Image (cartoon, rainbow, N blue to C red):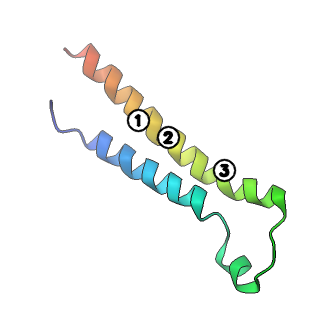
């Protein structure tokens, strides 16, 4: 098994995406203590979803590359 920077970057993307999904409310909304409309909640989760998909894509490409080079 060889050292792959792509896997490290993918794990960072996955962790960042999960954190973005969990903490989706912006800071100014938390300061006002108002309830956010439901459609805004999903709009703010989209970057986290995209970051997670990007990390999964990097892992899949790395696995395919690993099988092709053996």
Q: Position of residue 2 (x, y in %)?
A: 15, 33
In the image: residue 63, left or right of residue 2 = right
Instruction: Determine whether 10 is above or below 23 in the image.
Output: above
Q: Secondary structure at mark 2?
A: helix
Q: Please tell me the numbered disc located at residue 46.
A: 3
Q: Please tell me the numbered disc located at residue 54.
A: 2
Q: Are marks 2 and 1 in contact (CB under 8 Å)?
A: yes
Disc nearer the start of the sequence (1/3): 3
Tell me the distance, in whole angstroms, between the alpha carbons under discs 1 and 3.
18 Å
Residue at image point 56% right, 59% down: 20
Residue beneath disc 1: 58
Q: Count all numbered tags in the image, as a single digit.
A: 3
Q: Secondary structure at mark 3?
A: helix
Q: Please tell me the numbered disc located at residue 21.
A: none
Tell me the distance, in whole angstroms, between the alpha carbons under discs 2 and 1.
6 Å
Q: Secondary structure at mark 1?
A: helix
Quarter of the image where one finds residue 38: bottom right
Crowding at dot 2, Cα within 10 Å, few <14 / some 14-19 / many 20+, comes out as some
Q: Position of residue 62 (x, y in %)?
A: 33, 29
Q: Are marks 1 and 3 in contact (CB under 8 Å)?
A: no
Tell me the distance, in whole angstroms, between the alpha carbons under discs 3 and 2.
12 Å
In the image: residue 47, left or right of residue 56 = right
Quadrant location of the N terminus?
top left
Instruction: Determine whether 29 is above or below 64 in the image.
Output: below
Quadrant location of the C terminus?
top left
Residue at image point 41% right, 35% down: 58
Q: Nearer the viewer, residue 24 or 5?
A: 24
Disc nearer the start of the sequence (3/2): 3
In the image: residue 49, left or right of residue 1 = right
Crowding at dot 1, Cα within 10 Å, few <14 / some 14-19 / many 20+, comes out as some
Q: Position of residue 18 (x, y in %)?
A: 51, 53
Quarter of the image where one finds residue 32: bottom right
């Amino acid at each position: 098994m060889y050292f792959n920077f792509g896997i490290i970057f993918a794990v960072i993307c996955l962790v960042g995406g999960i954190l973005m999904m969990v903490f989706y409310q912006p800071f100014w909304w938390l300061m006002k203590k108002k309830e956010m409309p439901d459609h805004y909640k999903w709009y703010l989760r989209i970057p986290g979803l995209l970051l997670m998909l990007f990390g999964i894509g990097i892992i899949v490409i790395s696995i395919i590359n690993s099988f092709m080079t053996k």
